[in-house]
Amino acid sequence: MNKMTTLPCMRGKSLERPVLLGFASARVLHGASFADVLDEASGRGYQRRLNSRHSLDFRRYAQRPESTTIPLTFNLRGSDGDGWSLQGGGEGVILNLARGAKPLAQVDCQHRLGHLSDLDVELPFMTFVGLTEREEMEIFGVINGKAKGLSNSLLDFHDAQLCADLASEKPELLVALHLKNEPTSPWYNRLDLGGNQVSGLERRASLRTMQKACRILTRRLKPRSLDDVARIAHDFWLAVAMVMPDAFAKPRGSLVTKGVGVYALTELAADFVLEAAATARCDTAHFAALVGDIAPLLDWSSDGPLGGLGGEGGARRAADILRELRRRPRLAVANG
């Protein structure tokens, strides 16, 4: 009984990388491949979550007359003998895939192949040979960096993995990741990266949202050290969570943990620090007192004055609303 699937291929190059080109049925390619989806709990992987609607759309299209597609892109993980082998030494080779093995990492075909496991439609494919996971991630980012629907937060996560010196290249991303990874932070494992989510934890803002917010702090609080900015961000959001616990317990009902609220509150955090006396310690207790003066005065739901605000202009308007509340602390704002 043949325990190998054999696929005739041509050797070649994609720019400077060696590749194999061939054709195979969707059923075979699906069975021999996998999508290395980001596992947010462990930090392994780099792909986005499968969008079933997107994938099912392609399934319907693939069964129509005269349908076509560009080659599916894979990477043969590991070395020759790790579930795959090459036979032949010229331009024409045979790719042998061990039955039951999945050596083909789906670099750029996850959504086209996701729901084709039972179809025998023929598909063109190209596979790199022996790229590392880091190299796969780099190529995935180049191919999909501008792709519609690809999570910006997932690309930010890729940047964090690929930057040689994140503190210098993207300090705001380092601060945002500190908020996500620090167990005492109210944002611990609650920033959506675009991969498989940590089970049991409700989502609030995305990593991209928090990165943009942290850029406000790193820009406005210069020349403070990055460690100090990260501590300030941590202590400030801990104070917000203490003062407004319902916003974190039930994030869908509050704009505190949504983009406009995150940006506006971060502007306020910078105000607090810049206004403090040189000897003042801007810690959780300090921030809690200041946030506590303002929080009860505003309707933080989408029906309140922050509802409908979006973009950079909306964020500035939201910050101005909070600053006005500080100037008029006894004037409750309701419905704008």
Image (cartoon, helix red, strand yellow):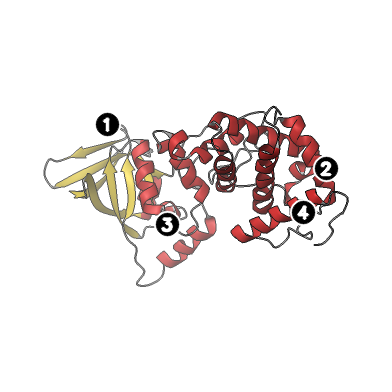
- Kind of residue sitting beneath label 3: Lys
Q: Is residue 111 visible?
A: yes
Cβ–Cβ below 8 Å for labels 4 and 3? no
Mark 1 or mark 4: whose residue is earlier in sequence = 1
Cβ–Cβ below 8 Å for labels 3 and 2? no
Q: Position of residue 254 (x, y in %)?
A: 75, 51
Name the outermost residue toward the left. 90
Mark 1 or mark 3: whose residue is earlier in sequence = 1
Q: Say left or right for 257 vs 138.
A: right
Q: Say left or right for 143 vs 194.
A: left
Residue at label 4? 324
Name the outermost residue toward the bottom. 65
Mark 4 or mark 3: whose residue is earlier in sequence = 3
User: Residue 214's quadrant in the figure?
Assistant: top right
Residue at label 1? 81
Q: Secondary structure at mark 2?
A: helix
Q: Which mark is residue 293?
A: 2
Q: Say left or right for 104 vs 52.
A: left
Q: Residue at x 42, y 57 (%)?
A: 146
- Kind of residue sitting beneath label 1: Gly
- Rounded to the nearest whole Å, what is the CA distance between mark 2 and mark 1? 66 Å
User: Residue 229's quadrant in the figure?
Assistant: top right
- Rounded to the nearest whole Å, what is the CA distance between mark 2 and mark 4? 12 Å
Q: Position of residue 63 (x, y in %)?
A: 41, 66
- Kind of residue sitting beneath label 2: Asp
Residue at label 3? 146
Cβ–Cβ below 8 Å for labels 1 and 3? no
- Kind of residue sitting beneath label 4: Glu
